[in-house]
Amino acid sequence: MQIHFHGAAHTVTGSQHLLEINGHRLLLDCGLYQGRREETYSRNLNFMYDPRSVDAVILSHAHIDHCGNLPNFVKKGYEGPIYATLATVDLATLMMADSGRIQESDAEFVNRKNLERGKPLIEPLYTEVDAQHAADLLRGVNYGQPFEPIPGVIAKFVEAGHILGSAAVSLEIEEKGKKTRFWFSGDIGRFGLPLLRDPIMPEPVDYLLMECTYGDKKHNDPSAAFDEFRDVVKRTIKRSGKVIIPAFAVGRTQELVYHLNTMMHDGDVPHVPVFVDSPLAVNASQIFMRHREVFDSETLKFIEEARHPALNFKMLTYVHSVEESKALNKRTDPMVIISASGMAETGRILHHLRNNIEDPKNTVCIVSWQAPYTLGRRIADREKQIKIFGEPYSVKAEVATIGGLSGHAGQDLLVKYATTVKKTAKKVFLVHGEEKSATPFMDILSSQGMHDVYYPDIHDSAEL
């Protein structure tokens, strides 16, 4: 039995881990790598193995760095099932279709420039039609329901508490008469997040494959982050400014909407217009509202007591058309605009930043991890000059970063997660984390007696 680390190794994106068991191949996640643009296209385009040789895929959740390369994978010949939780099936279908549209649009934009410069044209990584072909292979499975993705492997999904439908993957493996327990964490959520149930700690296992995005950093308590976010909104409104929030369309946007709903319901902030300006986020929010069965008890109680949906309230507008989106930048009244993409690389958020980042009344609020070399990282790093659509802009708006709103576990919970299997784990593999996060995390685990902890490089392999 072998595992091959073909993505999210020494980086946080592009999750892709290939298991070889009983002569069969099982792929855990197939996400898009996000980084330097010149590197991203070729890295996502090519696989280190033939997709046609894979027998099954298990998807941990619907974020694009975990599901976003499935359409390309299917385009290159994969025809097997893609297992996911029921909510993930709905969200991934939406996410992949949106990504297909973006791939086509980006290729069209690049080709216009290439024509002007006499450079060769490029093909989109995949199209919206390719995304639909991948969606057709999705197979929904309930949390806790055993299924057999390949011979000799019994899998089940366990609540990960990261986004709606997110799951850790438990594998009971039998190979050549030997039984092995394997656990893939997916992205680990946090205790006390709005909307979502808390993550479940791993069962005793032989091998643990886990993320370490924040292995170097403890998070503030979610309630403290909530207070910090409230203060950012209050002081920006007080100076008649706009709060501009680049936010991932799935997960972060819905949490922010819920926060703002409770703030205004409780009278903690003035009632100002709140706009969700991302077609993907608007559609994703509809899916969230369809899957109330996986909301936590606190959210269900709020819905009952407030007598209105958690993700819909009087001051909230879900923006649909481009015209509505453009009109927001002509308004001068205080408001909150939540828009995608979460790393400010594409989408309508770029227009809101372009129109608002040079006004000191406004605030750009960074609420999630930003990949290196992205516009979101440059803003979070307080660079004074940035480029948007190739044009220079001075950052005069306040920049507020609120790490405590992250949907990823902080260092404390990651340590708890790993040490839960301390007595049984033969090896722990750390993925989905930069070296600056993985190194101190490994040191902590070593100090607690866990010495067989590995931080594989891209395309490394290991015997299990």
Image (tube, grey):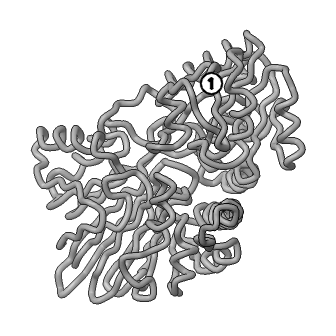
Three-letter amino acid code at disc 1? Ser
Rendered position, 425 above or below 69: above
- Determine whether the residue tagged by mark 1 lies in a helix, strand or loop: strand
Q: Residue at x 61, y 64 (%)?
A: 92
Quarter of the figure with the C terminus: bottom left
Left or right: residue 429 compared with residue 226: left
Q: Residue at x 46, y 54 (%)?
A: 159
Q: Quadrant of residue 360?
A: top right
The image position of residue 42, as x and y in percent, is 47, 68
The image position of residue 79, as x and y in percent, is 53, 87
Q: Quadrant of residue 356?
A: top right
The image position of residue 331, as x and y in percent, is 87, 26
Which residue, as the protein is rendered here, is positioned at the far top? Answer: 238
Which residue is under mark 1? 394
Q: Residue at x 83, y 41 (%)?
A: 325
Q: Residue at x 27, y 54 (%)?
A: 430
Quarter of the figure with the N terminus: bottom left
Left or right: residue 35 compared with residue 6: right
Rendered position, 99 above or below 410: below
Rendered position, 227 above or below 132: above
Examine the rendering and report whether any part of residue 138 can be seen. yes
Q: Quadrant of residue 18?
A: bottom left
Q: Count up the numbered dots.
A: 1
Left or right: residue 443 compared with residue 30: left
Which residue, as the protein is rendered here, is positioned at the far front? Answer: 118
Rendered position, 132 above or below 406: below
The image position of residue 421, as x and y in percent, is 22, 53
CA neighbours of label 1 inside 10 A, class few (<14), some (14 to 19), many (20+): some
Examine the rendering and report whether any part of residue 268 can be seen. no
